[in-house]
Amino acid sequence: MPLALEGSQAIARAVALCRPQVVSAYPITPQTHIVENIAKLVADGALDCEYVSVESEHSAASTALGAAAAGARAYTATASQGMLYMSEVLFDISGLRVPLVLTCANRALSGPLSIWNDQSDSMAVRDAGWIQLYCTSNQEAIDTHIQAFRIAQETTLPVMVCVDGFTLTHTMEPLELPAQETVDAFLPAHRFARMLDPQAPLTIGTMVGPEAYSEVRHDHHHALLAAADNILRANADWAAASGRDWGGLLRASGPADARIGILGLGSLIGTLEDAAEQHPELPPTRIIALRAFRPFPFEALQAICADLDELVVVERAISPGAGAIVAAEVRAALSELPRAPRVHAVAAGLGGRDIGIGLYPNLLEVAQNEKIERFRIIDLDPQRLPEELSA
Amino acid sequence: MTAVPIPLSDLRRRQPRFTGISPGHRACQGCGELLAARLVTEAAGPDVVVANATGCLEVTTTNWPDSAWRVPWIHSLFENTAAVASGIEAALKAQSRSSKVLAFAGDGGTFDIGFQALSGMIERGHNVLYVCYDNEAYMNTGVQRSGSTPVGAATTTSPAGKERLGKRHLKKDILSIIAAHYMPYAATATVAYPADLRHKVRRAIEVEGPTFLLVHSPCPQGWGHDGSRTVEVARLGVQSGLVPLIELERGAVTGVMPIREPRPVADYLKAQARFRHLFADSAEAARELQHLQALAEHNIERYGLSAPGPEAHDSEGADTVRRGGNQWA
């Protein structure tokens, strides 16, 4: 039976179902409700774990690293400035091949200060060597967290589960929370083969010279590419256990004969799907939710886009001076196709600007541009721009 | 050949003690930090997990594929050692494992960049012994001044010149800051008194909670003295009063190593090139020397270090020599 849960509360309870042994937490909006809910579960005796209230995000990530290296199932959560502050540690966690799970409650970056949602934070650490999974809904967030713990321990790679701040984290809706037995059957007891143990002392985190550093990076890169199989298996096994299939690396909806595609990450997918339903008069559209951004699903993306003429990528972040982030990678992947669709890039919903149904017709207009849209922010308010830029 | 029975006492002496760091590491001759770390790991024993900050101790002992460590050891970053140790300790607790967690860092990683994580670790009461190997500058990067560098010391970023006499700021009183966290046990030690150091390690490990040890560790390269004089220089630091050896429990002084025959700070300073400019023929140099002498006297006064009678024989020092090889067996 579905429960009425806030997204953050649902994520906290999903994490608790995975029996983490160490949770480190430092508060930042809009992640706070997640760590507050976990703290309450611990306080109520519903979750038996070491809850470490650290003094910074840098230490949140470091404490999770230490715990995971000592063989514990570890979890932490952050957003925005917190993600940037811990970014040094994020690279180290993945480089040392220490598995743990982190929730990113996606939020814009300073300055200027914004507490509202976009995906600048997780995009800024896309090269940190983590698996990155983006959730389109709170139900997907519940299921993805459970899958993430299994993917992490199978691959000895850290997994970042990205959920749009406020849009998902602070929305209450009816959600299915799996039974503890279902999760226990899906998620084996945590084991880390290289754990710190006086009975079998290992040295972790040595200094590696030019004679081996490239090979370490090669291994890391290929471990991430190979993790695609683990993501697919976790998704399939969880679909069998729960009846909910989130597509693995990506998923698409819409009529099979669609020649126009729209690709995005996160909660805007639901909005676009609703919009497509409300606008049957518009051309048929394939809406593609990119679930795994790392590893980047080259083959799956090529397969789903092979018969498209136009593809509009909706960015929830910007790389100033270049523009597109996701579309740049999508273009590179699709360039290998014999007949690639034109790829347009627009950003929308930066710093919490509302993404409504009205975005959808605008995206289809972009798809029918004479020229390829290299990149622009599609929902600008010209009134707020200096005159010389508003034309 | 018939076997000659060996007396039990001899066997005990020959029995190699556990040591956490093997020989063959790449530290400089006479490195105070490596000596200190060896003594600490010997006293701590094998049932430990070490989190180590970036620095000389890390880079000289773990050049892949070699490692000098015989205990489980992890290096993550420069400033997060206390947080990594916190995580290890939390994991051990969650798994009902009883090994002691040790955190090792230099003075840069403790006084400066790693201070926030250390303060958090102590405030949260993690059962970790944090050892700061204090060589009073960023030695691994080439002798730059840190919050621990003493006033008047020349480093590459606080050089002595026509207008400056080395570092212009006082060494941070880290022990008092640590003690202000209602610290169960915090102490200073030095490589010059190994028995005292070992005693303090064992005392710190017995405490179920955070403990802190500041180990004065000369750096021949950075301080400018011969590698053979490491222990002598460290000892002069104590005897001059500049390096007080004290124990604090919950902020109260519970132990001091008395100074029976105080030496002028000039004896300590003259032994090191980093203070050479203080012996120039100038009023400023003389004033800075007086300043350092006053700091030493302040320590002696503040901690009550003066004690009558001749210098006590450091019996455990002899013990250290015996462990160094077969010549005493």
Image (cartoon, grey):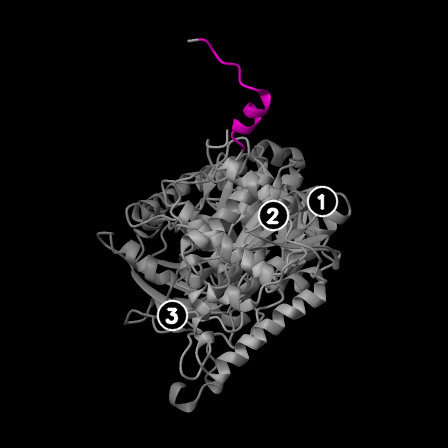
Q: Tell me the mark number nearer the camera, choosing from 1 and 3.
A: 1
Nearest to viewer (mark 1 / mark 2)? 2
Q: Residue at x 54, y 30 (%)?
A: A199
Q: Can you see residue A170?
A: no
- Can residue A192 be found in the magenta stretch? no
For the residues labelled 3 and 2, say whether their Cβ atoms are less than 8 Å apart.
no
Task: Give the residues drawn in magenta, as a range.
Answer: B2-17
**Label 3 sits on what residue type?**
Glu
Q: Earlier in the sequence, mark 1 or mark 2?
A: 2
The residue wearing badge 3 is A365
What is the C-alpha distance between the residues marked 1 and 3?
A: 67 Å
Q: Is residue B61 above or below residue A330?
A: above
Which image quarter: residue A317? Answer: bottom left
Q: Which residue is mark 1?
A: B208
Whether discs 1 and 2 lie on one chain: the answer is yes
Q: The residue tagged with tag 2: helix, strand or loop?
A: helix
Q: Is residue B201 above or below residue A344?
A: above
Residue positioned 47% across, 59% down in the render: A88
